């Protein structure tokens, strides 16, 4: 099964993160904090590539918003989700591949219909 054939069967908010059941039988969990810190949009990528500023701790928006929480999660085509964050940031498009990669595998089982049924 290639990455392109892996897609979520169910996405569910659980505790402080997102639980995803994938069609290959794997269940992953990723914290919102991790997703927010790995925002793939151009300005966040640029921000992460800059040398760290030792004086910067949190922006005023981050302080006001508190811990990262999604306010919305919208499918983008069949390959990605756009997440709207409680700090107002909404330009990050998270591909399924990224969601899968960032998640920690909490369980995995043999996918159903992985092998064609034997002829009777
Ligand atoms: Zn971003």
Image (cartoon, grey):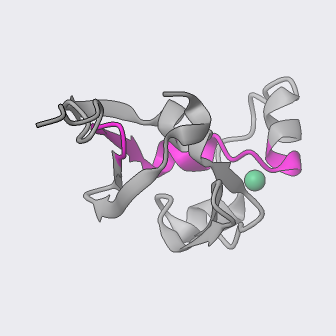
* 20 with respect to 102 (left or right): left
Magenta stretch: give its range: 22-44
- Residue at the location (40% across, 43% down)? 30
User: What residue is at 58 percent from the left and 62 percent from the top?
Assistant: 63
Total residue callouts: 0
Residue 97, percent from left and from top = 59, 38
Q: Relative to 116, is 2 on the left or the right?
A: right
The vertical placement of 29 against 106, above or below, is below
Question: In which quadrant is the C terminus drawn?
Answer: top left
**Furthest residue toward top:** 51
Can you give x and y, in whole percent of width and height, for residue 61 in the image? 68, 66
- Picture quadrant where residue 38 is located: top right
Q: Residue at x 51, y 68 (%)?
A: 70
97 left or right, relative to 88: left
Front one among 4 and 87 = 4
- Give the residue drawn at x 74%, y 28%: 54
Q: Is residue 73 shown left or right of residue 77?
A: left
**Residue 42 inside the magenta-drawn segment:** yes
Give the x, y percent position of residue 11: 37, 60
Residue 33 lies within the magenta run: yes
């Amino acid at each position: 099964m290639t990455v392109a054939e892996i897609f979520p069967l169910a996405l569910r908010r659980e505790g402080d993160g997102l639980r995803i059941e994938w069609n290959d039988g794997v269940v992953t969990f990723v914290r919102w904090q991790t997703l927010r810190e790995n925002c793939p949009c151009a300005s966040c990528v640029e921000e992460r590539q800059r040398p760290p500023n030792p004086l910067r701790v949190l922006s005023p928006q981050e302080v006001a918003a508190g811990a990262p929480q999604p306010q919305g999660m919208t499918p983008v085509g069949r390959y990605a989700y756009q997440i709207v964050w409680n700090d107002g940031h909404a330009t990050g498009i998270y591909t399924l591949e990224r969601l899968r990669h960032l998640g920690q595998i909490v369980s995995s089982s043999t996918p159903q219909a992985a092998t064609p049924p034997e002829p009777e």
